[in-house]
């Protein structure tokens, strides 16, 4: 039966293979969104600076604008004295220049007068009458940021697929960009299984469980800039299942199914995905633990991607994080590994592994910067609540001993 996973594909190979077969990145629809509504969304195209930044050379410190050769020998024991020629006012262009032997008071952010090439910090000076005592030398460019030093006009400042967040919104606002071309990728999420019921179901009927995966996957995608629509629960019945999947594929660009761990549901899902236009069903299992029973399909001509995630909650979220997210990033033209943080840290306790599959174990990071594994079964729903990410154990690595360093992927 097609539901049995007999051959599995390494995760990185699956990512590369699917991206190539579906010719990622796609030309995704975009919409110009006001800056105040664009937070958390992915940028649809490269953004270039229309003007240089800073627009003028300005001071980085409160102090005095000087000609650096005048103070090259200044020390606390042998200070240099300069004539105070004026004050730079915030928000105005100085109407005077600095000649040799002169200095001008300047606030942080003030425009550097012509003739000056450095700023002496205020704490290194004393003002006496019309003279400024300078007790420390500066070189040309010290405590100054030059016009166009950070961005030149026409320079790319953000790339296609970057996310608008607290780190990047400052660039957009600085450059006066008040609307952002954002990706309009339609993602649908469907949960599968006759045992699955809506979250509001009370009392819970015997043999049933409330839907977890639909909501958790939607939340994960949203965190990384991909808004998705939760479309409810599918029946396991073959004909109804196929009709619902086909109908949903027509309405979206990316369909994410959760469930399908059982042989029967995997059979339905495999048969439906095999009928898609080329390339159809591309991956029938991933060589990872947890998450082996994952299916990936798509249609190149119609620009459709379908990913069927495992049904157990921990397996589902693991595959969504390590496989679905990088697929979506490649689809929109972003860096496929450009999310979360990957590093190596020492581990607190042994983690048992076996060579063969790539394994992902939930973990938390302690205040001392060590990894504390969270050992959990694939059906657990609470293991990720306190987790900071996953320990990644490569295919060729066996048990990791306490004190060894391990690769950790943080949210």
Image (cartoon, grey):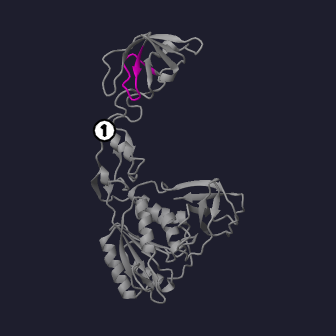
Q: Residue furthest bottom?
A: 206
Residue 77 picture location, percent across and down:
60, 13
Instruction: Kindly indicate the quadrant of the structure image that contains residue 5.
Output: bottom right
Q: Is residue 133 above or below residue 312?
A: above
Q: Residue at x 39, y 16 (%)?
A: 115
- In the rendered structure, the answer to whether residue 34 lies left or right of residue 215 reads left
Q: Nearer the viewer, residue 137 or 88?
A: 88
Q: Is residue 40 above or below residue 264?
A: above
Q: Residue beneath label 1, please? A: 50
Q: Residues within 10 Å of mark 1 (few under 14, many from 20)?
A: some
Q: Is residue 93 above or below residue 151?
A: above
Q: How many marks?
A: 1
Instruction: Kindly indicate the quadrant of the structure image that contains residue 332.
Output: bottom left
- Secondary structure of the residue carrying tag 1 is loop
**Secondary structure mostly seen in the magenta stretch:** loop
Q: Residue at x 67, y 59 (%)?
A: 347
Instruction: Kindly indicate the quadrant of the structure image that contains residue 290.
Output: bottom right
Q: Nearer the viewer, residue 153 or 385?
A: 385
Residue 348 picture location, percent across and down:
69, 60
Residue 49 counted in the magenta span: no
Q: Is residue 295 above or below residue 65?
A: below
Residue 109 counted in the magenta span: yes
Q: Nearer the viewer, residue 366 or 268?
A: 366
Q: Residue at x 33, y 40 (%)?
A: 175
Q: Is residue 322 visible?
A: yes
- In the rendered structure, the answer to whether residue 392 lies left or right of residue 270 reads right
Which span of residues is magenta-colored? 103-118
Q: Is residue 20 visible?
A: no
């Amino acid at each position: 039966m097609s539901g049995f996973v007999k051959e599995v594909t390494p995760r990185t190979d699956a990512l590369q293979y699917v991206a190539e077969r579906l010719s990622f990145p796609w030309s995704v629809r975009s919409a110009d969104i006001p800056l105040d509504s664009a937070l958390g969304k992915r940028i649809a195209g490269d953004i270039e600076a229309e003007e240089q930044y800073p627009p003028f050379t300005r001071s980085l410190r409160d102090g005095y604008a000087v000609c650096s050769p005048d103070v090259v020998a200044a020390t606390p024991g042998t200070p240099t004295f300069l004539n105070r020629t004026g004050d730079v006012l915030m928000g105005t262009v100085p109407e005077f220049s600095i000649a040799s032997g002169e200095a001008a008071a300047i606030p942080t952010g003030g425009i550097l007068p012509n003739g000056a090439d450095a700023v002496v910090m205020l704490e290194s000076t004393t003002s006496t009458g019309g003279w400024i005592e300078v007790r420390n030398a500066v070189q040309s460019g010290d405590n100054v940021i030059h016009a166009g030093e950070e961005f030149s006009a026409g320079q790319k400042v953000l790339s296609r697929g970057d996310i608008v967040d607290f780190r990047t919104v400052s660039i957009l606002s600085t450059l006066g960009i008040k609307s952002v071309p954002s990706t309009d990728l339609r993602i649908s999420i469907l949960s599968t299984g006759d045992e699955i019921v809506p979250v509001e179901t009370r009392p819970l009927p015997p043999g049933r469980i409330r839907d977890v995966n639909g909501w958790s996957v939607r939340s994960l995608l949203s965190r990384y800039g991909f808004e998705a629509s939760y479309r409810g629960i599918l029946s396991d019945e073959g004909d109804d299942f196929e009709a619902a999947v086909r109908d949903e594929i027509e309405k979206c660009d990316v369909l994410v199914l959760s469930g399908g761990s059982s042989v029967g549901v995997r059979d339905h899902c495999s048969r439906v995905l095999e009928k898609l236009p080329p390339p159809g069903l591309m991956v029938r299992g991933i060589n990872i633990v947890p998450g082996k029973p994952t299916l990936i399909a798509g249609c190149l001509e119609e620009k459709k991607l379908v990913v069927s995630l495992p049904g157990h909650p921990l397996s589902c979220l693991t595959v969504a994080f390590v496989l679905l997210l990088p697929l979506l990033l490649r689809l929109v033209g972003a860096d496929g590994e450009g999310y979360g943080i990957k590093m190596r840290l020492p581990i607190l306790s042994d983690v048992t592994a076996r060579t063969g599959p790539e394994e992902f174990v939930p973990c938390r990071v302690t205040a001392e910067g060590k990894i504390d594994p969270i050992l959990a079964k694939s059906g657990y729903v609470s293991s990720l609540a306190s987790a900071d990410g996953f320990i990644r154990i490569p295919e060729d690595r066996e048990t990791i001993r306490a004190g060894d360093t391990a690769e950790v992927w943080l949210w």
